Image (cartoon, rainbow, N blue to C red):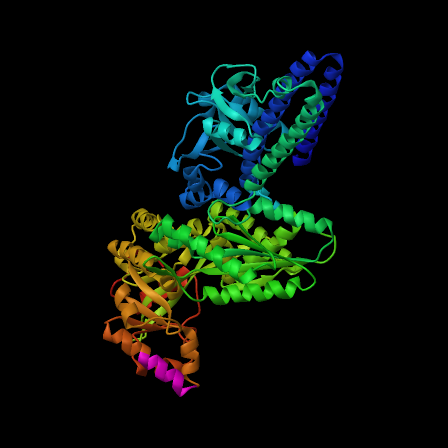
Amino acid sequence: MLRNIRIKSASSIVTMIVLFVAVLGFSLFRTIDAANTVDTERTRTAVAAAVQAQVKQIIVMVDDNALWDAAATAVYTRMSDTEFFWSSWGYSSAEGKYFDTVLVLDHEGRPLLGYHHGRATRFDPIARYGEPFRILLERADRQRQAVGGLAGSADGPVLIGIANIVPTNGALDKLVPKSGPYWLVFTKPFDQGAADQIGRSLLLEDMKLSSKSSGKASIAVRDTAAKPVADLSWTPARPGTTALERVLPWVAIASLLHILAGLFFGRQALRSVSKLADEAMVDSLSNLPNRRAVRRELDRRLKRGERLALALIDLDGFKGINDNYGHHVGDRLIKSIAMLLQELVGKNGMIARLGGDEFAILVPGASAVNELQDISRAMLDKLSRPFRIDERTVLVGASIGLASVSLRDLDSSELMRRADVAMYSAKQAGKMRLAWYDEMLDQKQAIARTIEAELRLAIDAEDFELVYQPLVDIHERKIVAVEALLRWSSPTRGTVNPSEFIPVAEETGLIDAMGMIVLRKACRDALDWGDVRLAINVSAAQLRNPEFASALSHALAETGFPADRLELEINESYLVYDPDAAGRVLREIRSLGVGVSLDDYGTGHASIGFLRQFSFSKVKLDRSLVTEAGLSEEARTVIHANIAVARALNVAVAAEGVETADQADLMRVAGCDQLQGWFFSKPVAGREIAIRVLKDHPEHPSSRLRAV
């Protein structure tokens, strides 16, 4: 596109010269008049090209933001994720450098969300901008590509860019509604500031934007319906008049100067177009190249057959920092990460911010693979230490996916897809890791997508099975609690281990619906098991849902299950990750009367202060400690120390993974209150638990237990 504009501008300059020479042959007067006319027309062409360059800029900007996996995922699955939309679009609308208004429309053109000058808004763009907007929308729908143009409004002309919100990753195409993709709309005022920019770039004096034509040196600014919405006027240079004031011997010199001036102005116009295009390639927050710039650089180098290595970086924990400390801290952190990457990469490669909390590093050359791996490891090492933002200390991690190419067998989209697949593999492996792409990752991703699709069907049908493993009293060996364990059988893969399908559910957001199904089913099963408590594992992904406590309360009310018999088991990694947020969530849960126990106790960061801060009703010793207790005096010492900490705070202690009588005796001597493991019972169906509860507690049988 930029090349076409240059060709057109050069053609205009050539036309000017030819016309000038032809008129000079008729008469001096006509030469003078023609010189003025040609100069004005040339300037009109340059001004028109500059206007179109601003239209092109907003088209490039909206296309870059719409052709984005993260945007497609957020729009089609997480419309409530205001943090993503603010960091990606709301912030930039407040700055107003590239656009001041952003809208997301459904396929029918109805507004779903938007920002204007950084404030949330929602309005009907057709009602505001009229027929020109409708024409643009129809053109974008017909051409299936980003479009742009001008429209009038009550506040004056505006530049408009429209594009379909679609993912670049084919695996995400299923997110797009069958009725058609949504629209992303950017608008920016075409005001006197825009006119001044055109005037400066073309060296034109007194460039004015007005509602009516104000002279010969002007052009009409037309909307997409070809109707004039404004007029751009300027003071013409009038080189012919200048030549008239000179004596005839100087006419030739004046003519030559005119031609040189035309060439100069044309070059300035081309530079202006190039500058506007370059600005559309820069992320406004970090001042790094953006996603489109990376793709352009990849395409350029791949065409030359260069060896390349690409890293995609996703920050772990950035959303929590934004939520807890505010956008200003998040923005400062993004800038700090950008500076860190520039320090690590130096002049060896290209750094870009892809949007939100995603970055990219591109390294060319024969040693690109080794260089990029060293850079990635150095970044993980740097991120292991906290950042100081104002008066706050924040800790953020990263998952890094790497991919390389040495032959002309890949395009930019495929290389970015591979790095993206590797990045998600690193994230699933535990975060703060890097992973190189290999073909097995594609197979794993395909399996994960199959599991996702089948999980959705299972959630719709509530097709899950629960088994229960009892916890017994240390002295009487009677059941005092049961832990609900989830089981699921895939239609194509048979029984699937929870370690395979739970991460998929967490990654795709299905864990919320699945977790509530498990909670309701377990509560119904355990409702008539006397005073036996019910323990259910809850993942960190569920607890990060701000509506979790409300959903929990609703489930208890729906099933009639007593809140004081329910105990939620959580992992301490969730607490360490963001203690402040975790504390708020646990207080909401306890306010319902529900107990909270700490799972896998003794293997991580838990301390006296930690246990006191979160007021657990129970801690469960990790099965690895129980296994090692019979083999190592050191392990037994660790167990005694951990139990002593819990005892000091009046917190009950349970041991899981008890498989032998010796282990049971060791845990009893150590001071445990409850035991769980195959020595007492394997996980069994609810019917068998009911029979055992009746046997252990005949004094409080329910009607249902009698029926059994």
Asked whether the viewer can see residue 415, the reply is yes
The C terminus lies in quadrant: bottom left
> Is 629 situated left or right of 216 in this image?
left
- Residue 635 lies within the magenta run: yes
The residue lying at 53 percent from left, 14 percent from top is 215
Quarter of the image for residue 667 reads: bottom left
Measured along the vertical axis of the image, is residue 630 above or below residue 34? below
329, 260: nearer the viewer: 260
Q: Where is residue 8 in the image (x, y as percent from the top left)?
A: 69, 28
Q: Where is residue 376 in the image (x, y as percent from the top left)?
A: 55, 63
Measured along the vertical axis of the image, is residue 569 above or below residue 157? below
Asked whether the viewer can see residue 488, the reply is no
Q: How many labels does the image show?
A: 0
Q: Position of residue 371 (x, y in %)?
A: 62, 64
Measured along the vertical axis of the image, is residue 24 above or below residue 384? above
Specify start and end residues of the magenta stretch as a single range.
632-641
519, 701: nearer the viewer: 519
The residue lying at 60 percent from left, 20 percent from top is 238
Q: Position of residue 73 (x, y in %)?
A: 51, 44
- Residue 111 lies within the magenta run: no
Quarter of the image for residue 608 reads: bottom left
659, 239: nearer the viewer: 239
Q: Is the magenta stretch mostly helix, strand or loop?
A: helix
